[in-house]
Image: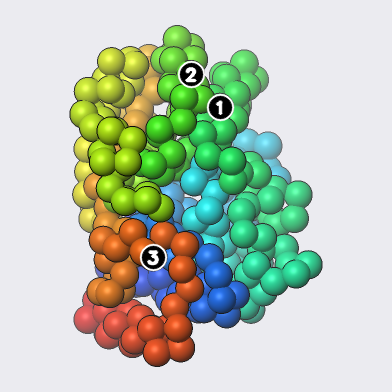
Amino acid sequence: MKITNVEALKKIAIEVRKEIIEAVYSAKSGHPGGALSCADILTVLYFNQMNIDEKKPNDPNRDRLILSKGHAAVALYSVLAEKGYFPKEELKNFRKLGSKLQGHPDMKKLPGIDMTTGSLGQGLSAGVGMAIASKMDKAGCKIYCILGDGEIEEGQVWEALTTASKNNLDNLCVILDNNNLQIDGEIDKVGGMNNITEKFLSFGFNVVNINGHNIDEIIDGITTAKQTKGKPTIIIAKTVKGKGVSFMENKALWHGKAPSKEEYELAIGELNKAMLEN
């Protein structure tokens, strides 16, 4: 069921953030910062935009989502659980030995995972292949691929972009989680990645810039991508690493660090307060 009420989507996104914190705390490991930054984007995709049915996870005509920044898997797992692909209780097994919820998405272990990811830079290549296949089969599927901004330092990303543009893949929507931080610090200082908009324009993409935490802007951005013909679209979503938890926000430290008991309680308290205020 498509949810159109923006306030309802905001509440789902907050619940997803709570589940991210719960899962990472339970596992005592994970990547909360980049998971929290893409929670709103994933919420809009799964609850408002994508042609999917959790009861038919293998429907050949479904839209596809590739979380190329696979280390943020806990965000995708939380959204899938919230959507009903599997019981929420399973989130407690995140990163546990033998769990279906591995540290990176595995399409062979969990319903709703469209592509196994983890090696940064590879997800978009798979997405381009899916988009080409959908065109060849006249299936009408939309392919969404979420990249991290540190990830776009990988050369394979730009090779995939060239192929997408050459093949006029207007059924491909790339979303860049532009939180400006990677494990070693700010992206422009680590890899010199700047002038991002101009770079994507030069590769023949339609470029849309949005606030990646504004539900209305996310919806409008994806709608624009769907309406754009003859070229692929990239949505550059300006986000905040650790969004929703004050002491995690804009801190590279939280790229791959689990909270302590005190930090966990503080984070859940802040998110519970946010839920009451929305």
Q: Position of residue 127 (x, y in %)?
A: 55, 31
Tag in front: 2 or 3: 3
Tag in front: 1 or 2: 2
- Amino acid, disc 1: Ser
Which quadrant of the structure image shows residue 153? top left
Give the Cα distance between marks 1 and 2: 8 Å
Query: In the image, is residue 267 above or below residue 67?
Result: below
Furthest toward the top, the residue is 166
Q: Residue at x 62, y 36 (%)?
A: 61
Q: Which mark is residue 159?
A: 2
Chain-order first, disc 1 or disc 2: 1
Q: Position of residue 66 (x, y in %)?
A: 54, 42
Give the Cα distance between marks 3 and 1: 28 Å
Q: Residue at x 44, y 78 (%)?
A: 259
Chain-order first, disc 3 or disc 1: 1
Q: Nearer the viewer, residue 105 or 228?
A: 105
Give neighbour class at mark 2: few <14, some 14-19, many 20+ (Cα, 10 Å).
Answer: some
Q: Which residue is mark 3?
A: 254
- Amino acid, disc 2: Glu
Chain-order first, disc 2 or disc 3: 2
- Amino acid, disc 3: Trp
Q: Which residue is mark 1?
A: 125
Which quadrant of the structure image shows residue 203? top left
Q: Position of residue 207 (x, y in %)?
A: 27, 28
Circles 1 and 2, Cβ within 8 Å, touching? The answer is yes
Give neighbour class at mark 1: few <14, some 14-19, many 20+ (Cα, 10 Å).
Answer: many
Q: Secondary structure at mark 3?
A: helix
Give the Cα distance between marks 2 and 3: 30 Å
Q: Secondary structure at mark 2?
A: helix
Q: Nearer the viewer, residue 248 or 82?
A: 248
